[in-house]
Image (tube, helix red, strand yellow):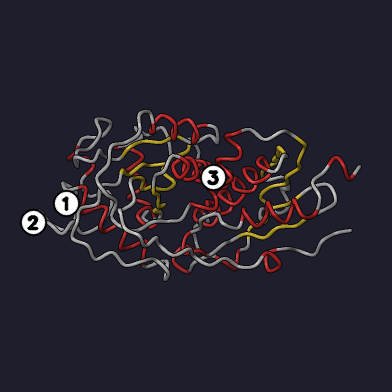
Amino acid sequence: MDDRARPDDDTVATALALALRAPSRGNTQPWRWQITPDSMHLYLDRTRSLPVTAGDQRDVLLGCGAALHHLSVAFAALGWATIVHRMPNPDNPDHLAAIAAIARRPTTQDLAMSAAIIHRRSDRRHYSDWTAPPGYLGLLTERAAASGALIRPLHDRSGDWPASGTRAATQGWTGEPAFGSSGPHDLGNAAAYRTAAIIRERAMTSSAPADETAEPDHADLLLLATPNDDRLAHLRAGEAMSAVLLTATNIGLATCPLSAPLDNADRRLRLRRDILDDTAHPQVILRVGQAPDTPDLPPRTPRRILAEMLFPIHA
């Protein structure tokens, strides 16, 4: 292929470095990359699964999908549109995507989304009270839909549950203690659920900052779901998750993905029934809101160096 028709090595390295900033549960970074003269290839690294999720690849595929979307966003800002073939090799299920790039002038949105990669971090602190930007939920829903996913709010910030599922039906789907007087599975207080979910997710990430404040958490909880529940759907859900997180970051909001509450299969079935009306499968919960007004930002989680994630380069 004519060298002028493909990105040079520096451009590829820059895009991959940004792709490595993608979120993954427990910061496992469960991906490997292979670069060929005409394309890039994303592979699942099975050695990076967490013990608690080793039997279910949903979380590692979510992380790989996020890295795939980050790569496309980075390339777009560098002047290259990506053509992605997902699950291209039936004989190798770990070969998740083959990516080619074609020259295209970047848009203002491309540049903004790429910049959001640098600024985004999983913020596990309690979020401040806030007024949501007009149309923000519609925008996040639109970005998720572009990757074949949908968004459903789990509650509003008053603690009430949405009309799509009755409050009584929704109580108990997390399986978390609610720290209240109505028993261990009462979810009448949405703030209790948020606290429990954050505690569980912190346990998976040693670098997560402590938040001992007694202030309530004012995050919105958004359920990201897909029509199917196979490996391709999990990969696409990761792409949608990345799109939502970067879009929220771009409009100045803090975010944090929570997948630990969905480890339990019965819990996912309840969400499918009570929130999604049996029309989609829950994949991840996203906390979105206003970061606390403090000078100290959560630390960035470390990333492996690119050389550790590359297969040998083919000539």
Mark positioned earlier in the residue sequence (2 or 3): 2
Residue 256 percent across, percent down from the top left:
40, 52
As drawn, the label of residue 186 is 1
Work out which residue is located at the far right of the displayed protein and give it. Answer: 2
Q: Amino acid at mark 1?
A: Asp
Circle 1 residues within 10 Å: few <14, some 14–19, many ≥20 = many
CA separation in Å, label 1 and label 2? 8 Å
Provide the secondary structure element on which disc 1 rests: loop
Provide the secondary structure element on which disc 3 rests: loop
The residue that appears at 30% across and 53% down in the rendered structure is 293
Left or right, 168 with respect to 96, comes to: left
CA separation in Å, label 1 and label 3? 31 Å
Circles 1 and 2 in contact, beta carbons < 8 Å: yes
The residue that appears at 49% across and 55% down in the rendered structure is 59
Q: Nearer the viewer, mark 1 or mark 3?
A: 1
Left or right, 95 with respect to 138, comes to: right
Left or right, 248 with respect to 273, comes to: right
Circle 3 residues within 10 Å: few <14, some 14–19, many ≥20 = few
Quarter-wise, where is residue 103 in the image?
top right
CA separation in Å, label 2 and label 3? 39 Å
As drawn, the label of residue 181 is 2
Mark 3 highlights which residue? 230
State which quarter of the image contains the N terminus: top right
Residue 248 percent across, percent down from the top left:
44, 42
